[in-house]
Image: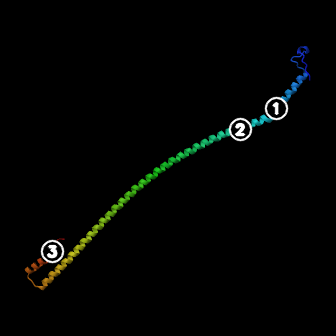
């Protein structure tokens, strides 16, 4: 197609439009429309689907993040509760240990008092045994003195003045300390 450079006024056309140009413009418009439709169908729909998928992934990631944050808050609360319980248990254990220590102290003091009582009681028994032993020794000594006196009485038959004198002498020999205990 050859367009002439003639002015449009001479030919009677506005802007130099003829039927062939309008037909070519119509075909090109249809081709551009088909091209846009094809590009839209081939490229835009997959891009749109990819964007929607990306949008859904972002939403699910946000939901998962919110859920994870909530789970973390729950876990922290449980941890804090366990720490509080551990503190309470530690206080309870210390309190129980103190009670046991006081009880053990009381038991030890009671045992010590009981042992002291046994020692005092044993000492008293030993003192009583010692007294009995001394009494037995004194009795034996008296028996020996009486035997000596009797022997001396038998050797000599004496009158009562002589007997008194012998008794005094015997007592002096034994000593007065023996009779006072």
| Relative horizontal placement of residue 112, taking residue 151 as reference (left or right) | right
Q: Quadrant of the N terminus?
A: top right
Q: Which dot marks residue 37?
A: 1
Q: Quadrant of the C terminus?
A: bottom left
Residue at coordinates 34% horizontally, 61% vertically from top-left?
Answer: 112
**Along the polypeptide, which appears first: circle 1 or circle 3?**
1
Residue at coordinates 50% horizontally, 49% vertically from top-left?
Answer: 86
Contact check, label 1 and label 3, Cβ < 8 Å: no
Q: Which dot marks residue 72?
A: none
Q: CA distance from mark 2 to mark 3?
A: 128 Å
**Along the polypeptide, which appears first: circle 2 or circle 3?**
2
Pointer 1: residues within 10 angstroms few (<14), some, or many (20+)?
few
Quickly name the residue at label 3.
Answer: 175
| Relative horizontal placement of residue 106, taking residue 48 as reference (left or right) | left
Q: Count the labels in the image.
A: 3
| Relative horizontal placement of residue 4, taking residue 52 as reference (left or right) | right
Pointer 3: residues within 10 angstroms few (<14), some, or many (20+)?
few
Contact check, label 2 and label 3, Cβ < 8 Å: no
Residue at coordinates 63% horizontally, 41% vertically from top-left?
Answer: 65
Image spot of residue 6 (x, y percent): 90, 16
Q: Secondary structure at mark 1?
A: helix
**Along the polypeptide, which appears first: circle 1 or circle 2?**
1
Image spot of residue 88 (x, y percent): 48, 49
Residue at coordinates 14% horizontally, 77% vertically from top-left?
Answer: 173
Tell me which corner region of the image, top left, top right, bottom left or bottom right, holds residue 127. bottom left
Instruction: Look at the picture and state if 92 lies above or below 49.
Output: below
Quickly name the residue at label 2.
Answer: 54
Q: Secondary structure at mark 2?
A: helix
Tell me which corner region of the image, top left, top right, bottom left or bottom right, holds residue 73. top right
């Amino acid at each position: 197609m050859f367009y002439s450079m003639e002015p449009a006024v001479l030919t009677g056309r506005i802007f130099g439009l003829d039927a062939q140009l309008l037909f070519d413009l119509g075909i090109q418009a249809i081709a551009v429309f088909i091209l846009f439709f094809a590009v839209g169908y081939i490229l835009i729909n997959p891009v749109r689907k990819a964007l929607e998928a990306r949008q859904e992934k972002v939403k699910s990631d946000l939901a998962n993040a919110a859920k994870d944050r909530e789970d973390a808050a729950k876990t922290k609360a449980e941890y804090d509760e366990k720490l509080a319980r551990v503190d309470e248990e530690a206080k309870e254990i210390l309190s129980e240990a103190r009670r046991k220590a006081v009880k053990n102290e009381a038991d030890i003091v009671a045992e010590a008092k009981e042992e002291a009582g046994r020692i005092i009681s044993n000492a008293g028994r030993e003192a009583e045994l010692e007294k009995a032993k001394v009494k037995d020794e004194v009795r034996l000594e008296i028996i020996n003195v009486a035997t000596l006196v009797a022997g001396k009485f038998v050797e000599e038959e004496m009158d009562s003045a002589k007997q008194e004198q012998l008794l005094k002498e015997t007592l002096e020999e034994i000593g007065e300390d023996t009779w006072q205990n």
